[in-house]
Image: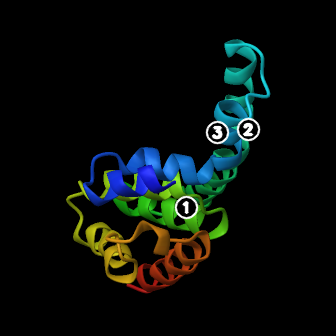
Amino acid sequence: MKGFYNEWKGIKDPLTYFLYRDLKEICEDIFWRRIYRNRGEAKAYFIREGFKVFLPTMFVMGGRMIADQDFNFRSDYTYLRACLTGLHLAPNFTMFYLLKKESLDSFDPLVKRGWKTFGQELSFNDPEEITLDKISKISGQIFEKIKNS
């Protein structure tokens, strides 16, 4: 983990760092314990176990989008609501990183403000400070703020 942390300090590959945090046990099984004898078995295990980490977040996001489909929300706002709900109810590091990075490109000021709050609440200078509990809590708080805007 220390090597990924050093890379993070230089902002070279934070995505790899967050992937590792989500999939640490899977990576240890494949790369350190080498419990699989061939590449195909290792790949199948990695994909199967990775889906267990990421699918719950995506399902919650999809559920929020379906719940919001009858409202006349702007697409960026609908997406923000879906992301925040997913991260609140089924947080993971990788989805947090990907969604935050992508959403900063939004032109909608409400969406930008929502994601900017993460930067104010979590220190990106020390990624070890970012926890699933904090991601969940802050996502819920931001959702409540934007819901009442």
What residue do we see at 44% from left, 44% from top? Answer: 16
Front of the two marks 3 and 1: 3
What residue do we see at 67% from left, 36% from top? Answer: 32
Q: Is residue 146 depicted above or below 103 in this figure?
A: below
Does residue 79 appear anywhere in the picture?
Answer: yes
Residue type at mark 2 is Glu
List x then y, in percent, for residue 136: 58, 73
Which residue in the structure is indicated by mark 3? 27
Q: Quadrant of the C terminus?
A: bottom left
Disc ID at residue 49:
2
Task: Identify the secondary structure beneath mark 2.
Answer: helix
Q: Is residue 14 left or right of residue 56?
A: left
Based on the displayed image, in which of its 4 quarters is residue 79 positioned? bottom left
Q: Is residue 10 depicted above or below 147 in this figure?
A: above
Q: Is residue 140 depicted above or below 52 in this figure?
A: below
* Category of crowding for the residue at label 2, using alpha-carbon neighbours closer than 10 angstroms: few (below 14), some (14–19), many (at least 20): some
Does residue 58 appear anywhere in the picture?
Answer: no
Residue type at mark 3 is Cys
Which residue in the structure is indicated by mark 1? 68
Task: Identify the secondary structure beneath mark 1.
Answer: helix
Residue type at mark 1 is Asp
Q: Nearer the viewer, residue 51 or 25?
A: 25
Q: Which badge, 3 or 2, comes first in the chain's sequence?
A: 3
Q: Which badge, 3 or 1, comes first in the chain's sequence?
A: 3
What residue do we see at 60% from left, 69% from top? Answer: 132
How far apart are labels 2 and 1 at the CA level?
30 Å
* Category of crowding for the residue at label 3, using alpha-carbon neighbours closer than 10 angstroms: few (below 14), some (14–19), many (at least 20): some
Task: Identify the secondary structure beneath mark 3.
Answer: helix
Based on the displayed image, in which of its 4 quarters is residue 47 positioned? top right
How far apart are labels 3 and 2 at the CA level?
10 Å
